[in-house]
Amino acid sequence: MARFFVRLVCILFFRLIARVKVIGFDRLPAQGGYIAASNHIGRLDPALAYYFLDRKDVTLLVAEKYHKYAIVRWVVRVLDGVWVDRYGADFKVLRLMLRRLAAGGVLVVAPEGTRSRTGALIQARSGSSYLAARAGVPLVPVATTGTEDKVVVGRLRRLRRLDITVTVGHPFTLPPLDAKDRDQALQRSTDEIMCQIAALLPPSYRGVYADHPRLIELLKEQESGTDHASL
């Protein structure tokens, strides 16, 4: 019941303060485990997952720095979220996530590990690609615009509704990790995830991946109507 209440609050909140447009919702797998990987530009981003994902097995990873807030601790407990150390390897969390994905759950992650202060993509960490390769589940790229903290504060102060767009890309899978070339394989997979996200974003949001060869390749595939290629 508490989980239902939290999701209802999220839905009502966004309907009150924003016009939310979701593109490509039908690309989300109807069943089975998958990882939704998104850019992270504002504090409202995590709540969006519960706005448009009507599943009871959605897991959100929450940075340990928010543990000091009682309301956040309560919400994380109610939603069965997982606290994560963004700067260290937590194998207990990794094993838990692998179990949930194997059981058919959905994991929502931000590969960058923190909010982008500019709204443009910043260099991602390899944790998400490692988890996806180990789990062997599809990855779904998700791009969000309109939730930048400065934009949110500025608009709400002027009593103007937000214009939020969430674009869902085609699911893709990563190849198994090559034990002989692990670091480079992780980097290639991480770049793949971020370039898939960047391809869904306007040019000004693509940040450090704007000139990446893989992104250029993906954009050409979009133009030719084959925008679902994977690594």
Image (cartoon, rainbow, N blue to C red):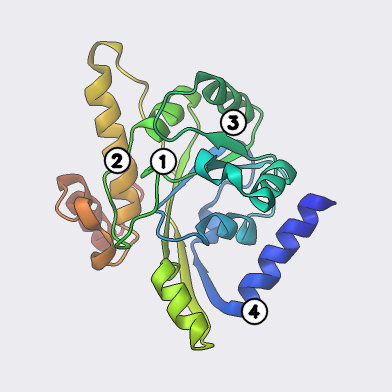
Q: In this view, does 82 lie above or below 79?
A: above
What amino acid is found at the position of numbered circle 2 in the picture? Glu
What label sits on residue 101 in the rendered view?
A: 3
Q: In this view, does 22 lie to the left or right of 81?
A: left
Reading the chain from its start, which is encountered first: label 1 or label 2? Answer: 1
What amino acid is found at the position of numbered circle 4 in the picture? Leu
Q: What element carries label 1?
A: loop
Q: What element carries label 4?
A: helix
Q: What element carries label 3?
A: helix
**Residue at which label 4 appears:** 16
Q: Which x, y percent locates residue 152? A: 47, 74
Reading the chain from its start, which is encountered first: label 1 or label 3? Answer: 3
Label 3 crowd bin: few (<14), some (14–19), many (20+), radius 10 Å: many
Mark 3 in CB contact with mark 4 (< 8 angstroms): no
Reading the chain from its start, which is encountered first: label 3 or label 2? Answer: 3
Mark in front: 2 vs 4: 4
Mark in front: 1 vs 3: 3
Label 1 crowd bin: few (<14), some (14–19), many (20+), radius 10 Å: some
Reading the chain from its start, which is encountered first: label 3 or label 4? Answer: 4
Q: Nearer the viewer, residue 163 or 200?
A: 163
What amino acid is found at the position of numbered circle 1 in the picture? Phe
**Residue at which label 2 appears:** 192
Reading the chain from its start, which is encountered first: label 2 or label 4? Answer: 4
The quadrant in which the C terminus is found is top left
Mark in front: 1 vs 2: 2
Q: Which x, y percent locates residue 151? A: 41, 74
**Residue at which label 1 appears:** 172
Q: In which quarter of the image is residue 182?
A: top left
Mark 2 in CB contact with mark 4 (< 8 angstroms): no
Q: In which quarter of the image is residue 199?
A: bottom left
**Residue 226 in view:** no
